[in-house]
Image (cartoon, rainbow, N blue to C red):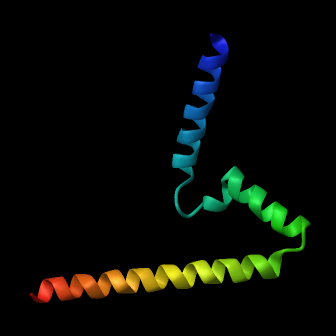
Amino acid sequence: MTTQTTATTTKEEQAKADAAIGPRNFRHNPDIENFYRFVNENALRHEAKVLFKTILDRLKKSSAKKAKEAKKATRH
């Protein structure tokens, strides 16, 4: 029974720690640090850059589309 309590507490503590990191310090998140380490150790910098560029382009298109739809909605 103590194992379940410890696991729950650990998850709760991790959630609190993740929330405390904030948007500016996301690089200090253990998952992000592990990702950067993986990219570095496997010489995947070029591939990671292409991946992030693709993601950012799609996010920009999506947000531009939403802004355009919102603008149309306010006109009518």
Q: Nearer the viewer, residue 70 or 18?
A: 70
**What is the x, y in percent for residue 63?**
40, 80
Q: Residue 23: x percent and y percent?
A: 52, 61
Say which quadrant the C terminus sits in.
Answer: bottom left
Classify residue 25 by image quadrant. bottom right
Which residue appears farthest toward the left when viewing the image?
Answer: 76
Tell me if residue 30 comes above or below residue 61 in the rendering: above
> Foreground: 76 or 29?
76
Instruction: Specify whether 73 is left or right of 31.
Output: left
Residue 44 at what x, y percent from top left? 84, 74
Q: Is residue 3 above or below residue 38?
A: above
Q: Residue at x 57, y 52 (%)?
A: 21
Question: Count of labels shown?
Answer: 0
Using residue 55 as the reference point, say whether residue 75 is left or right of it: left
Q: Quadrant of the N terminus?
A: top right
Q: Quadrant of residue 34?
A: bottom right
Residue 53, image x, y percentages: 64, 83
Left or right: residue 4 compared with residue 68: right
Q: Residue at x 26, y 84 (%)?
A: 69
Question: Please, is residue 19 above or below residue 11 in the view?
Answer: below
Residue 47 sits in quarter: bottom right
Q: Residue furthest top?
A: 1
Instruction: State the residue at coordinates (83%, 62%).
Output: 38
